[in-house]
Image (tube, rainbow, N blue to C red):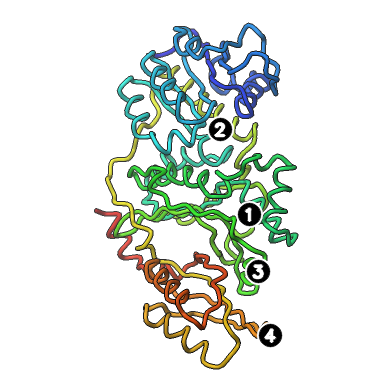
Amino acid sequence: MVKRDRIIRVGQIGCGTVGSGVIRILQDNAGAISRRTGCEIRVVRIAVKDLADARYVEVPEGMLTIHAGDVIEDPEIDIMVEVMGGIEPARSFILEAFAAGKHVVSANKELMSTHGGEILRAAEGAGVDIAFEASVGGGIPILLPLKQSLAGNAVNQILGIVNGTTNYVLSRMTQEGLSFSQAITKAQSLGYAEADPSADVEGRDAAAKLAILASMAFNSRVTLDDVYAEGITGITSDDIAFGRDLGYVIKLLAVAKDEMDGISVRVHPTMIPANHPLATVRDENNAIFVSGDAVGELMFYGKGAGSLPAASAVVGDVISIARNMLSGGHMVGCTCFYEKPIKNMADVVCRYFMIFDVPDRPGVLARIAGVFGDNEVSIKSVIQHGMGKEARIVLITHAVREESLRATVRGLEELEAVNRIVSVIRVEDPEVEEAQGTENRAASRKE
């Protein structure tokens, strides 16, 4: 239905960091937004947990309520903004808003990465729009470009730094020589990390974002449970130093690839070449590197979190829906029309960086090389550092299946000639692409 009175009324659930930013942008830029949209966008109701809580933005008292139903059931409200986070009751509130004929804008990565298919189907069934640009990359526009600007491409790969906390921590460890614990403490003091940073440093936050990205990029549903996630808590100064010596930088990388035998989706610490564009992304910034068959390589870069960057994406979605309401159009709905298999992590092909300590005596390297050979793992380069009675071995393998690398690690752990395995970190660079073959990937996309 075309909106005739040129006023779009918005109700919001949640007024924390992001929610306050939404109100502030709509207030500060009201005139420009009205001219760009062709209508007035007016926030009329905000549901919060506690009326007495301090706010980051001034809101008229009469606009606040502690009952989400006051937003959902108000027939005058056209668009509901959900910025409360979590799965429940956010999921129920959104479904109720659809049933009430309301469009919804959400910043909820956890919800969309687990129940995205259900939410999108429910919106379509109700004839309303759901937009969630802020769920990935904060203020970086990425979901709309994947759905519209790059719709003519077969996107085959996404590499992303999509968690500002971990990127800040790794940046401080790399540039200042801090330990992990020192870097996370500094991040917390600056507000870049939560008091409990586990969702960030263990990779769960990035995994949720990657599930959403992969679903859109590859047109096949990927959920949070499909994504292999490994965090950065085990990264040491030695990993960073040896990686630098070999020409690599360590990042917590979100990796999604559309391959012949299925979709590979994984989040883990990764060695990337120092000359790769993602290697220069520092501190709390995010960047998403997209490869398409027609467009080639693109990188989307900017602030990945924070009140105003994330709120910017929310407001952009509100404006898009408002324009559609004026014209009688709709946003692009679910585009997951394939059912591609998700690759088991054991079948992923990668290169590996390894550090292990061994007794410094003749014959040790030969025995170690035998374990690698028995599991058909080829060594690309190896460096030995003497440490008195011990030697530290640093090596990088050629591309190999994860299953073979795991078998090699088990064999080394059982070997008397190995004192301890210090690190195993995946390496992402062009060799893997060459090993898998561009022809196979093209054939997969045509099916």
Q: Is residue 296 visible?
A: yes
The label nearer to you, 3 versus 4, is: 4
The quadrant the N terminus occupies is: top left
Locate residue 261, reporting x and y percent.
29, 59
The answer to whether 1 is drawn above or below residue 110 in the figure is above
Locate residue 140, reporting x and y percent.
56, 41
Q: Secondary structure at mark 4?
A: loop
Give 341 or 372, whichever is nearer the viewer.
372
Q: Mark 2 sits on what residue?
A: 313
Q: Secondary structure at mark 2?
A: helix
Locate residue 217, reporting x and y percent.
40, 46
Precedes in sequence: disc 4 or disc 2: 2
Precedes in sequence: disc 3 or disc 4: 3
The kind of residue tagged 1 is Val
The kind of residue tagged 4 is Gly
Precedes in sequence: disc 2 or disc 1: 1
Residue drawn where x is 38% and y is 14% of the image: 101
Task: Measure the alpha-carbon separation of dots 4 and 1.
Answer: 38 Å
Residue drawn where x is 44% and y is 18% of the image: 325
Check contact, mark 2 vs mark 1: CB within 8 A. no
How many residues crowd around disc 2 within 10 Å: few (fewer than 14), some, or many (20 or more)?
many
Q: Mark 4 sits on what residue?
A: 388
Q: Mark 3 sits on what residue?
A: 238
Q: Quadrant of residue 315?
A: top right
The label nearer to you, 1 versus 3, is: 3
Locate residue 288, reporting x and y percent.
53, 50
| Residue 309: image tag | none
Q: Residue furthest left?
A: 447
| Residue 281: image tag | 1
